[in-house]
Image: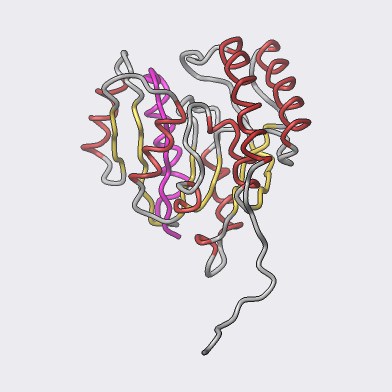
Amino acid sequence: MQLSIVIPVHNEEGNITLLHQEIRQALSGRHQYEVIYVDDHSSDRTPAILEHHGAEYPELRVIRFQRQCGQSAALRVGVQEARFPLVVTLDGDGQNDPADIERFLRLFSGQDSCLARQLVIGYRQKRQDTGWRCLSSWLANAVRRALLRDGAPDSGCGIKAFPRDFFLELPAFHHMHRFLPALVRQHGGKVYSLAVHHRDRSSGFSHYGTLDRLAEGIIDLFGVAWLGRRAMTPEIETEGQFHG
């Protein structure tokens, strides 16, 4: 199978090397793939490490922003630059397990699967985060499910798979990556959740504070709900050719 792996990163100097080794171990010899790291203007050694690995690994591509633009912008640019029709995303902190990718790919194994309007998203049943972070995430997910009814138990999980072209049909805005299940459903797609491994951070810390996400997320949540009420997703009953 051909796939593009898109990984937004910001100051992940201690995680990139191991993460890329795990990706190669999971996919090399099984699939044709590329790995696109989108560096959201890191201020540590992340750019140097990516440059070094880029010279060593032919499947690795690097995009670097001139200023920090956020995870959603990094994700969208990475998908736009993807060369293959199927995209898998991972977080750059190493908490997603690349060994889970193979299970995601099985849901795209059909002949026309890369043209399907669907999202497969991970579900972190046993999160390896602080108690405060788990609580805030649980609360955010509960409010989101109640308001958006997107059917996803964990919309914030970084490991996802979707067709490139379908993703690029979705509206682009800051923090849109947190609402992908709702946006996919609003545009006539299907959402599937898979239980995945979630691991401790081996290095560094989260660069997106929970309080910041909560304040901004409330505004985004109502915006996505507004889009949902106005979404146009007609279902075609019959289709044919008419001759005059």
Magenta span: 1-29
Q: Nearer the viewer, residue 239 or 41?
A: 239
Considering the image in quadrants, where does the N terminus appear?
bottom left
Q: Is 205 displayed left or right of 37 in the figure?
A: right
Q: Is residue 197 above or below residue 118?
A: above
Q: Is 175 displayed left or right of 24 in the figure?
A: right
For the point 46% across and 14% down, the residue is 204
Q: Residue 179 in the image: x percent, y percent?
A: 60, 34
- Residue furthest toward the front? 244
Q: Residue 190 in the image: x percent, y percent?
A: 66, 52
Q: Quadrant of residue 6?
A: top left
Is 189 a magenta residue?
no
Q: Is residue 243 above or below residue 180?
A: below
Q: Nearer the viewer, residue 157 or 18?
A: 157
Q: Is residue 177 above or below residue 167?
A: above
For the point 55% across and 42% down, the residue is 160
For the point 52% across and 89% down, the residue is 243
Q: Residue 192 in the image: x percent, y percent?
A: 67, 48
Is 4 a magenta residue?
yes
Counting every numbered tag in the picture gives 0
Q: Residue 225 in the image: x percent, y percent?
A: 67, 33
Q: Quadrant of residue 122?
A: top right
- Residue furthest toward the bottom? 244
For the point 43% across and 23% down, the residue is 70
